[in-house]
Amino acid sequence: MNDIRYIRTERLLPNPYQPRHKFESEEMLSLADSIKENGILQPLLIRRINNSDYFEVVAGERRLRGAILANVDKVPCLEVECDYEKSAVLSILENIQRCDLTFFEEAAAIGQLVNHFGMTQQECAKRLGKSQSALSNKLRLLKLPADVRYFIEKEGLTERHARALLRIEDEKQLWKVLKVIKEKGYNVEQTEKYIDLLTGTPKKHKKTPSKIYKDIRIFINTFNKAIETMVASGINAETDKTETDDYIEYRVKIPKNLKQA
């Protein structure tokens, strides 16, 4: 079915695999005001539940909540043919790609795709447009206990704070560190240094790579200037240059007994 239909909101049920758990009240009130003024501009995607008169929201739960707040009793919907598993996967993918999930919600959503629905990390990374390493780093966040994750979000700590805390294996020590971070207002760098001291195993920070000039002409010019400097200083340096399709070869002869110019 491809026709847009208006369905009563009480017949629309949320997707149980909706990865977004927080719907900020201020944001939802703003959306409700927009819906009152402009209506719902993009139809919700829905699927029928077991040939009944009820539907599951595949994508668009935020719009549905906004419509209910705005006292709109019917919303535009587009019915799609899919089973519960495909509905769940589409809901998760749609929400991740919206980029408004918290980092823990995103990690949990990716975890569902991999652990519950059997997607490989490679397939999941491709569907989400992420590198496999970035996806693995997201999944590692789920190693933190649920109450620790809740505390991190409640206190407004960042994803980098959470990554640093992964280095602490003892849960009691983890809570002590969280208490210090909260009381002293540690930023990420201060947190990492504090954990370095506690664990005695400094994090391996990425070294800034030396600047490498990919344009070989810069090296050639540097080499030629070195030869010119030697000659200008009275050193009778002789050079021989051979060039092929694959390489450039320089041979330099410098006399051992140097005469002052």
Image (spheres, rainbow, N blue to C red):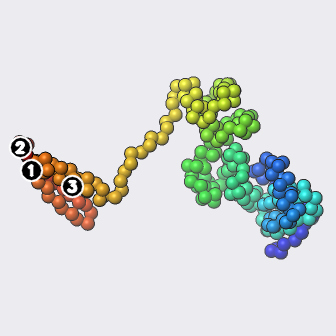
Asked whether disc 3 touches disc 2, contact meaning CB atoms under 8 Å apart, the reply is: no
Give the labeled residue for mark 3.
224
**Mark 1: few, some, or many residues within 10 Å (few <14, many ≥20)?**
some
| Residue visible at 69% across and 54% down in the picture | 99
Inter-mark Cα distance, 3 to 2: 21 Å
| Residue visible at 60% across and 36% down in the picture | 188
Q: Where's the N terminus, which quadrant?
A: bottom right
Residue 220 visible, this angle: yes
Q: Nearer the viewer, residue 194 or 115?
A: 194
Give the labeled residue for mark 1.
236
Query: Is 19 drawn above or below residue 7 in the view shown?
Result: above
Q: Earlier in the sequence, mark 3 or mark 2?
A: 3
Asked whether disc 2 touches disc 1, contact meaning CB atoms under 8 Å apart, the reply is: yes
Residue 56, horizontal then vertical, whole percent: 84, 60
Residue 82, horizontal then vertical, whole percent: 78, 65
Q: Earlier in the sequence, mark 3 or mark 1?
A: 3
**Mark 3: few, some, or many residues within 10 Å (few <14, many ≥20)?**
few
Tell me the kind of residue under disc 3: Asn
What secondary structure is found at the residue carrying circle 3?
helix
Q: Nearer the viewer, residue 140 or 178?
A: 178
**Residue 181: which quarter of the image?**
top right
Tell me the kind of residue under disc 2: Lys
Give the labeled residue for mark 2.
259
Inter-mark Cα distance, 3 to 1: 14 Å
Query: Is 230 drawn above or below residue 68 in the view shown?
Result: above
Say whether residue 223 is left or right of residue 181: left
Inter-mark Cα distance, 2 to 1: 9 Å
Tell me the kind of residue under disc 1: Asn
